[in-house]
Image (cartoon, helix red, strand yellow):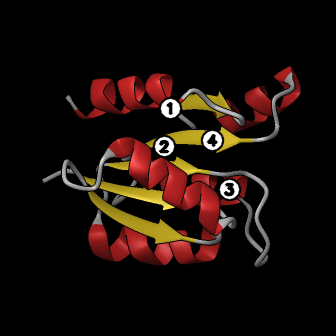
Amino acid sequence: MKKILIVDDQRQIRRLVAITLGREDYQIFEAKNGKEAIEIVKVEKPDLIIMDIQMPGGMDGLEATRVLKNDPETKNCCIIMLTGKGQEVDREKGFEAGADDYFTKPFSPLELLNKVEEVLG
């Protein structure tokens, strides 16, 4: 079973994404900030991370993505940004940090599901 980590400080968003993906199809993990995400990634080795950018706790999604993409053990994990920051400069920062794709909130559940299925095969 493929593993997905959903990282967002808003519980409702994590829940919406988990429901969109279908809990029976994937093993879902959740983190509320970048630091917690890195801890979970090191233990669970998810196949995909869906990462918000703006989060409290000292480490935002961009920084967490940089850390994960610069670590030889986690660099190959696919990271999809899912964020309210939708300007072109924000997208560029996401891709510079190492994101593999970028979705803006509010998001299309069908588009996100299609991308997840494409990534995880």
Which residue carries the number 2 mark?
A: 79
Q: Quadrant of residue 107?
A: top right
**CA neighbours of label 4 inside 10 A, class few (<14), some (14 to 19), many (20+):** many
Which label is found at residue 61? 3
Q: Amino acid at mark 2?
A: Ile
Q: Earlier in the sequence, mark 3 or mark 4?
A: 3
Q: Where residue 12 appears, x then y in whole percent?
A: 62, 61
Residue 60, how many percent across, how many down? 74, 62
* Front in this rendered view, residue 85 or 109: 109
Q: Residue at x 84, y 21 (%)?
A: 88
As measured in the structure, the alpha-carbon distance from the residue carrying label 3 to the one carrying label 2 is 10 Å
Label 1: how many Cα within 10 Å (few below 14, some 14–19, many 20+): some
Q: Nearer the viewer, mark 3 or mark 4?
A: 4
Q: Mark 4 — residue?
A: 82
Q: Mark 1 = which residue?
A: 109
Q: Evaluate if marks 3 and 4 touch, with contact meaning CB atoms under 8 Å apart.
A: no
Q: Residue at x 31, y 77 (%)?
A: 43
| Percent of width and height locating residue 87 | 87, 26
User: Can residue 76 be spotted in the picture?
Assistant: no
Say which element carries label 1. Answer: helix
Q: Is residue 15 visible from the viewing direction of this image?
A: yes
Mark earlier in primary sequence (1, 4): 4
Q: Residues within 10 Å of mark 2 (few under 14, many from 20)?
A: many
Front of the two marks 2 and 1? 1
Q: CA distance from mark 1 to mark 3?
A: 21 Å
Direction left: furthest residue: 1
- Badge 3 crowding class, 10 Å Cα cut-off, few under 14, some 14 to 19, many 20 or more, is many
Residue name at image x 30 percent, y 23 percent: 118
Amino acid type, label 3: Gly
N-terminal of the two: label 3 or label 2?
3
Comparing labels 1 and 3, the label whose residue is closer to the camera: 1
Earlier-in-chain disc, 1 versus 3: 3
